[in-house]
Image (cartoon, rainbow, N blue to C red):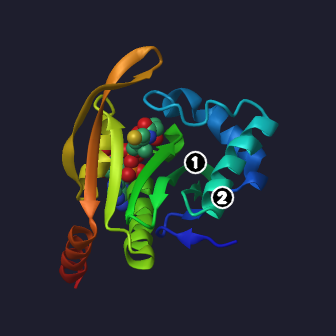
């Protein structure tokens, strides 16, 4: 068990695991409508057992090095998370994702947590390409991709259906050399 501080506002990044099922369910119930506006994240978690099953699926992904889930805690309360939806160390590619309940949004939690995840993927695991996918209608998500310095690769027109509506998916990415160069510029400007 570990926790990574994301700043001086009490925000922490920690692994989100099956034993968090009750806390995860309570968090989803507080934010369900907001969280699922553009993505189906957590829709299968409707009681403690199904919440545990969702977390177990993610734990399996971590165990097989195919992905993983981290939660975001603010002053000890689970308010969202960041994830490797896809993780392919052999090809050096991954896809990251995120969600927040309303109480966690607008504070830079996802942007800060994503920097930790991407640093780890690039420096610790040799990942070359980090991908971000979002519905074209999901402006807050696209703003995060832009804030992280990602480039817009393109749009997959009409490639998915959510809540009965067909949608376009934007694909954004950052490559390891770009990530390192942007980080060096930021660090340089900090001094
Ligand atoms: C997508 C989603 C996570 C974005 O949430 P968010 O709060 O905008 O993202 P962050 O946590 O990075 O916070 C950024 C906001 O906090 C502000 N902020 C405050 N302090 C900040 C800091 N230290 N660093 C960066 N941003 C900060 C930013 O200005 C920004 O607000 P703005 O968009 O009004 O300019 C959220 O809308 C969500 O959970 N949606 C539902 C689930 C979903 O769609 N997930 C994405 C699927 S692709």
Residue closest to the eye, 163 or 186: 163
| 115 displayed left or right of 27 | left
Q: Residue furthest front?
A: 90
Badge 1 marks a residue whose secondary structure is: strand
Q: Measuring 72% from the left and 30% from the top, which residue is drawn there?
A: 46
Q: Residue furthest bottom?
A: 191
Q: Measuring 39% from the left and 15% from the top, which residue is drawn there?
A: 165
Q: Give the distance between the C-alpha atoms of the residues marked 1 and 2, in whole angstroms.
A: 9 Å
Residue closest to the eye, 101 or 138: 138
* Residue 107 in sight in this render: no
| 48 displayed left or right of 65 | right
Residue 108 image-quadrant placement: bottom left
* Residue 79 marker: 1
In the rendered image, the vertical position of residue 145 relative to residue 113, given as above or below: above
Read off the residue under disc 2. Answer: 76
Q: Residue furthest top?
A: 164
Q: Mark 1: give few (<14), some (14-19) or many (20+) Cα within 10 Å.
A: many
| 171 displayed left or right of 89 | left
In the rendered image, the vertical position of residue 137 relative to residue 141, given as above or below: above
| 3 displayed left or right of 96 | right
Badges 1 and 2: C-beta atoms under 8 Å apart?
no
Residue 59 image-quadrant placement: bottom right
Q: Position of residue 97 (x, y in %)?
A: 44, 48
Q: Measuring 61% from the left and 70% from the top, which residue is drawn there?
A: 3
Q: Position of residue 72 (x, y in %)?
A: 56, 56
Q: Residue furthest right?
A: 49
Q: Position of residue 170 (x, y in %)?
A: 27, 38
* Residue 76 in sight in this render: yes
Q: Measuring 61% from the left and 55% from the top, which residue is drawn there?
A: 61
Q: Is mark 1 within 8 Å of ligand 1?
A: no
């Amino acid at each position: 068990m570990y926790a990574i501080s994301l700043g001086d506002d009490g925000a922490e990044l920690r692994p989100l695991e099956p034993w968090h099922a009750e806390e995860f369910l309570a968090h989803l119930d507080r934010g369900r409508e907001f969280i699922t506006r553009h993505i189906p994240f957590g829709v299968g978690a409707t009681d403690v057992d199904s919440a545990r099953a969702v977390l177990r699926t993610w734990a399996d992904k971590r165990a097989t090095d195919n992905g993983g889930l981290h939660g975001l805690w603010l002053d000890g309360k689970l308010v969202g998370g960041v994830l490797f939806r896809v993780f392919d160390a052999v090809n050096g590619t991954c896809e990251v994702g995120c969600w927040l309940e309303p109480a966690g949004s607008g504070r830079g939690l996802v942007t800060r947590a994503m920097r930790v995840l991407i640093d780890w993927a690039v420096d610790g695991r040799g990942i070359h390409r980090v991908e971000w996918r979002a519905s074209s209608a999901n402006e807050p998500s696209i703003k995060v991709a832009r804030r992280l310095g990602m480039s817009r690769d393109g749009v997959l027109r009409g490639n998915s259906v959510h809540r009965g509506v067909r949608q376009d998916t934007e694909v954004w990415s950052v490559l390891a050399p770009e990530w390192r160069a942007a980080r060096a510029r930021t660090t340089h400007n900090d001094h």
